[in-house]
Amino acid sequence: MAQYPNARIKFSDIMTAISNQLVDDAVVPDNNFVSWGTPDNTQPFIGNFDVLMVARAGVPRKRDGGPADFQIERLVDLWYRSEPNSDSQSSFQTWLKTTFAAIDNILNSVGSGGFWPEDADGNLLTIEAIDLETDSPPNYSRGSVFGDYACTLRCIYYPLVNPSRGIFPVP
Protein backbone atom coordinates (compact mmCIF):
# COMPACT_ATOMS: atom_id res chain seq x y z
CA MET A 1 0.00 0.00 0.00
CA ALA A 2 1.30 3.44 -0.89
CA GLN A 3 2.67 5.59 1.89
CA TYR A 4 2.24 9.37 2.24
CA PRO A 5 5.29 11.28 0.98
CA ASN A 6 7.57 11.88 3.93
CA ALA A 7 10.79 12.66 2.12
CA ARG A 8 12.05 15.31 -0.21
CA ILE A 9 12.45 14.01 -3.74
CA LYS A 10 14.00 14.89 -7.08
CA PHE A 11 11.49 16.01 -9.69
CA SER A 12 13.08 13.60 -12.14
CA ASP A 13 11.62 10.78 -10.00
CA ILE A 14 8.12 12.10 -10.76
CA MET A 15 8.95 12.39 -14.47
CA THR A 16 10.22 8.80 -14.43
CA ALA A 17 7.01 7.64 -12.72
CA ILE A 18 4.87 9.40 -15.36
CA SER A 19 6.94 7.79 -18.12
CA ASN A 20 6.64 4.36 -16.48
CA GLN A 21 2.87 4.76 -16.15
CA LEU A 22 2.58 5.52 -19.87
CA VAL A 23 4.45 2.26 -20.54
CA ASP A 24 2.38 0.28 -17.98
CA ASP A 25 -0.85 1.48 -19.62
CA ALA A 26 0.48 0.58 -23.11
CA VAL A 27 0.36 4.17 -24.35
CA VAL A 28 3.92 3.61 -25.58
CA PRO A 29 5.84 0.33 -25.99
CA ASP A 30 8.71 1.36 -23.69
CA ASN A 31 10.46 4.37 -22.16
CA ASN A 32 12.41 4.97 -25.38
CA PHE A 33 9.17 6.41 -26.78
CA VAL A 34 8.98 9.09 -24.06
CA SER A 35 11.11 12.22 -24.50
CA TRP A 36 11.80 14.83 -21.85
CA GLY A 37 12.34 18.53 -22.27
CA THR A 38 11.80 22.06 -21.04
CA PRO A 39 10.14 24.93 -22.91
CA ASP A 40 13.59 26.12 -24.04
CA ASN A 41 15.31 22.77 -24.54
CA THR A 42 13.41 20.01 -26.33
CA GLN A 43 14.72 16.90 -28.02
CA PRO A 44 14.16 16.81 -31.76
CA PHE A 45 11.60 14.31 -32.95
CA ILE A 46 13.12 11.13 -34.39
CA GLY A 47 11.12 8.05 -35.29
CA ASN A 48 7.48 7.27 -35.96
CA PHE A 49 5.96 8.65 -32.74
CA ASP A 50 6.69 9.59 -29.15
CA VAL A 51 5.23 11.35 -26.13
CA LEU A 52 7.07 14.53 -25.18
CA MET A 53 6.98 15.62 -21.53
CA VAL A 54 7.89 19.28 -21.08
CA ALA A 55 8.57 20.28 -17.47
CA ARG A 56 8.03 23.91 -16.56
CA ALA A 57 9.67 25.77 -13.69
CA GLY A 58 8.25 25.12 -10.23
CA VAL A 59 6.38 27.63 -8.11
CA PRO A 60 6.52 27.54 -4.29
CA ARG A 61 3.19 26.97 -2.57
CA LYS A 62 2.32 29.03 0.50
CA ARG A 63 1.85 26.87 3.59
CA ASP A 64 1.53 27.51 7.32
CA GLY A 65 4.22 25.04 8.30
CA GLY A 66 7.15 27.33 7.52
CA PRO A 67 10.37 26.00 5.98
CA ALA A 68 9.63 22.39 6.94
CA ASP A 69 6.45 22.50 4.84
CA PHE A 70 8.12 23.89 1.70
CA GLN A 71 6.25 22.54 -1.33
CA ILE A 72 6.60 23.09 -5.07
CA GLU A 73 3.87 23.05 -7.69
CA ARG A 74 5.20 22.16 -11.11
CA LEU A 75 3.44 21.77 -14.45
CA VAL A 76 4.26 19.11 -17.03
CA ASP A 77 2.92 19.49 -20.55
CA LEU A 78 2.38 16.28 -22.53
CA TRP A 79 2.57 16.29 -26.32
CA TYR A 80 2.07 13.54 -28.87
CA ARG A 81 4.47 13.67 -31.79
CA SER A 82 4.12 11.53 -34.89
CA GLU A 83 5.11 11.56 -38.52
CA PRO A 84 2.10 12.59 -40.63
CA ASN A 85 1.16 9.98 -43.18
CA SER A 86 -1.36 10.67 -45.89
CA ASP A 87 -4.03 8.19 -46.87
CA SER A 88 -5.10 7.74 -50.43
CA GLN A 89 -5.88 10.97 -52.27
CA SER A 90 -3.74 13.10 -49.89
CA SER A 91 -6.05 12.70 -46.92
CA PHE A 92 -4.64 12.59 -43.38
CA GLN A 93 -7.77 11.04 -41.85
CA THR A 94 -6.15 7.82 -40.59
CA TRP A 95 -3.18 9.70 -39.15
CA LEU A 96 -5.53 12.15 -37.38
CA LYS A 97 -7.61 9.32 -35.93
CA THR A 98 -4.43 7.68 -34.63
CA THR A 99 -3.30 10.98 -33.10
CA PHE A 100 -6.65 11.58 -31.38
CA ALA A 101 -6.66 8.01 -30.03
CA ALA A 102 -3.11 8.40 -28.69
CA ILE A 103 -4.00 11.65 -26.93
CA ASP A 104 -7.06 9.98 -25.38
CA ASN A 105 -4.81 7.14 -24.17
CA ILE A 106 -2.45 9.68 -22.57
CA LEU A 107 -5.38 11.31 -20.76
CA ASN A 108 -6.72 7.95 -19.60
CA SER A 109 -3.28 6.92 -18.32
CA VAL A 110 -1.95 9.90 -16.37
CA GLY A 111 -4.56 12.64 -16.74
CA SER A 112 -7.56 11.04 -15.10
CA GLY A 113 -6.98 12.62 -11.68
CA GLY A 114 -6.34 9.33 -9.93
CA PHE A 115 -2.67 8.85 -10.70
CA TRP A 116 -0.44 8.77 -7.61
CA PRO A 117 3.19 8.23 -8.67
CA GLU A 118 5.22 5.96 -6.40
CA ASP A 119 8.87 5.08 -6.05
CA ALA A 120 10.19 1.50 -6.14
CA ASP A 121 9.44 1.06 -2.41
CA GLY A 122 5.80 2.13 -2.79
CA ASN A 123 6.24 5.59 -1.31
CA LEU A 124 4.19 8.37 -2.85
CA LEU A 125 6.18 10.98 -4.75
CA THR A 126 3.55 13.72 -4.75
CA ILE A 127 1.46 15.32 -2.02
CA GLU A 128 -1.71 15.17 -4.13
CA ALA A 129 -2.73 12.97 -7.05
CA ILE A 130 -1.42 14.27 -10.36
CA ASP A 131 -4.28 16.15 -11.93
CA LEU A 132 -5.12 17.99 -15.14
CA GLU A 133 -4.30 21.67 -14.96
CA THR A 134 -5.66 22.89 -18.27
CA ASP A 135 -6.69 21.70 -21.70
CA SER A 136 -5.20 24.49 -23.77
CA PRO A 137 -1.61 24.61 -25.04
CA PRO A 138 0.88 26.77 -23.16
CA ASN A 139 2.20 30.01 -24.68
CA TYR A 140 5.69 28.65 -25.39
CA SER A 141 4.38 26.14 -27.94
CA ARG A 142 5.12 28.04 -31.12
CA GLY A 143 6.58 25.76 -33.75
CA SER A 144 6.25 22.18 -34.81
CA VAL A 145 8.91 20.74 -32.50
CA PHE A 146 6.30 20.06 -29.80
CA GLY A 147 3.73 18.11 -31.83
CA ASP A 148 0.07 17.82 -30.83
CA TYR A 149 -0.89 19.05 -27.39
CA ALA A 150 -2.40 16.40 -25.09
CA CYS A 151 -2.68 17.97 -21.63
CA THR A 152 -0.96 19.76 -18.76
CA LEU A 153 -0.45 17.92 -15.49
CA ARG A 154 -0.08 19.58 -12.08
CA CYS A 155 2.40 17.95 -9.70
CA ILE A 156 2.74 19.07 -6.06
CA TYR A 157 5.68 17.65 -4.12
CA TYR A 158 8.35 18.26 -1.49
CA PRO A 159 11.49 19.23 -3.44
CA LEU A 160 14.90 17.84 -2.61
CA VAL A 161 16.20 20.96 -0.88
CA ASN A 162 17.45 21.67 2.61
CA PRO A 163 14.74 23.92 4.11
CA SER A 164 17.18 25.35 6.68
CA ARG A 165 19.32 26.90 3.91
CA GLY A 166 18.80 29.25 1.03
CA ILE A 167 15.70 31.43 1.04
CA PHE A 168 14.71 30.28 4.53
CA PRO A 169 16.87 31.93 7.21
CA VAL A 170 17.53 29.91 10.35
CA PRO A 171 16.58 31.92 13.48
Image (cartoon, grey):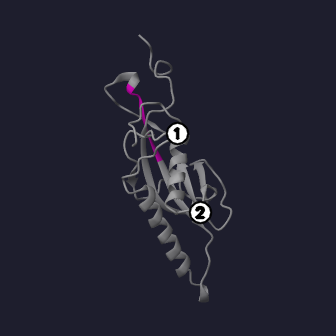
User: Magenta stretch?
Assistant: 69-75
The residue at 53%/59% (across/down) is 79
Front label number (2 vs 1):
2
Q: Which label was assigned to residue 68?
A: none
Relative to 10, does residue 37 appear above or below in the rendering? below
Q: In this rendering, does residue 126 appear at all?
A: yes
User: Dot 1 lies on which element?
Assistant: helix
Callout 1: few (<14), some (14-19), or many (20+) C-alpha neighbours within 10 Å?
many
Disc 2 residue type (three-letter): Pro
**Residue nearest the viewer, comparing 33 with 153:** 33
Residue bearing the label numbered 2: 29
Residue 108: image quadrant is: bottom left
Question: As shown in the figure, which amino acid type bears the numbered disc 1?
Answer: Phe
| Residue at the disc numbered 1 | 11
| Residue depicted at 44% across the width and 20% down the height | 168
The residue tagged with tag 2: helix, strand or loop? loop
Quarter containing the N terminus:
top left
